């Protein structure tokens, strides 16, 4: 049957292919929401602010586990809260050093929408990873996510052409300008192969809460990368303290002392 075909050999016999397709679509919608929310947030607020709010999945997942009665160790709960507090300090430091305007509240809102989409993506991605290899999952997730983004652009009447126009072409990323194809290659290798695929691969070994807390290291790295690219500032004392708290909280969650 279809469950034994090459590429689908990991599907259990009693798993409905229609359920898997539905979960794949929900996962892709969550992933697209996570990415779009973050990109839109950057138009209103600083890199640090957008990164911390979009990575608040740890608190959302922690609250969800508590609400449904799943066990949460003291080390996990405390570590998640400490790491998030540290990330907030990093964010506040970045916010004070930047020149974001009064519309920053909208940036926070879109970043939180990104976080909610990220939670949906992580929950369904973890389930799907039990049934398919990481490369197959990432290809389907990226492809369906791209379709979702294109549909949203169409519905919201954004300018979109099926050519290599550098600003609104669907294949504009293929241009050789420094901020198109070269940047796209960096994003594919660093952000997707090492980042997004790394998270998807780790879902076999870690709880979603552990992964989401590890994601809180992103605001820390984002500050240094933004400084190197001349789009941000080095952290002040709040940022350095926040960096330490993020590292300590992450260590507490990853190594709960069991």
Image (spheres, rainbow, N blue to C red):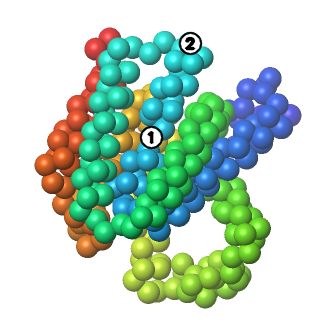
**Front residue (pair 161, 95):** 95
Kindly indicate whether the residue at mark 1 contacts the one at mark 2 (C-beta within 8 angstroms): no
> Percent position (x, y) of residue 28?
66, 49
Residue lying at the far front of the rendered structure: 102
Figure quadrant of residue 231: bottom left
Residue at position x 39%, y 48% from top? 52
SS label for mark 1:
loop
Q: Can residue 42 be seen in this view?
A: no
> Percent position (x, y) of residue 104?
43, 60
- Above or below, comparing residue 112 to residue 71 in the picture: below
Give the left or right position of residue 70, taking residue 209 as reference: right
> Percent position (x, y) of residue 178?
39, 83
Quarter holding the C terminus is: top left
- Above or below, comparing residue 7 to residue 39 in the picture: above
Figure quadrant of residue 251: top left
Residue at position x 56%, y 12% from top? 69
Q: Is residue 67 visible?
A: yes
Q: Earlier in the sequence, mark 2 or mark 1?
A: 1
SS label for mark 2:
loop
**Front residue (pair 157, 190):** 157
**Front residue (pair 216, 105):** 105
* Residue under numbered circle 1: 56
- Above or below, comparing residue 11 to residue 14 in the picture: below
* Residue under numbered circle 2: 69
């Amino acid at each position: 049957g279809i469950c034994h075909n090459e590429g689908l050999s990991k599907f259990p016999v009693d798993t409905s292919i229609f359920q898997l397709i539905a979960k794949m679509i929900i996962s892709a919608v969550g992933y697209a929401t996570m990415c779009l929310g973050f990109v839109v947030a950057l138009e209103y607020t600083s890199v640090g602010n957008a990164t911390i709010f979009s990575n608040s999945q740890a608190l959302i997942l922690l609250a969800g586990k508590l609400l449904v009665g799943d066990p949460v160790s003291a080390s996990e709960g405390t570590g998640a809260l400490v790491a998030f507090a540290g990330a907030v300090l990093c964010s506040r430091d970045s916010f004070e050093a930047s020149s974001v305007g009064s519309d920053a509240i909208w940036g926070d809102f879109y970043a939180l929408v990104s976080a909610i989409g990220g939670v949906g993506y992580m929950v369904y991605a973890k389930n799907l990873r039990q049934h398919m290899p990481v490369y197959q999952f990432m290809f389907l997730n990226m492809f369906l996510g791209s379709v979702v983004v294109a549909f949203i652009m169409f519905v919201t009447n954004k300018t979109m052409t099926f050519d290599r126009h550098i600003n609104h072409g669907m294949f504009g990323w293929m241009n050789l300008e420094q901020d198109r194809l070269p940047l796209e290659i960096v994003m594919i290798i660093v952000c997707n192969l090492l980042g997004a695929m790394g998270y998807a691969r780790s879902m076999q070994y870690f709880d979603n809460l552990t992964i989401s807390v590890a994601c809180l290291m992103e605001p820390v790295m984002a500050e240094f990368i933004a400084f190197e690219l001349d789009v941000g500032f080095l952290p002040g004392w709040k940022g350095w303290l926040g960096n330490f708290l993020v590292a300590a909280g992450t260590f507490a969650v990853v190594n709960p002392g069991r």
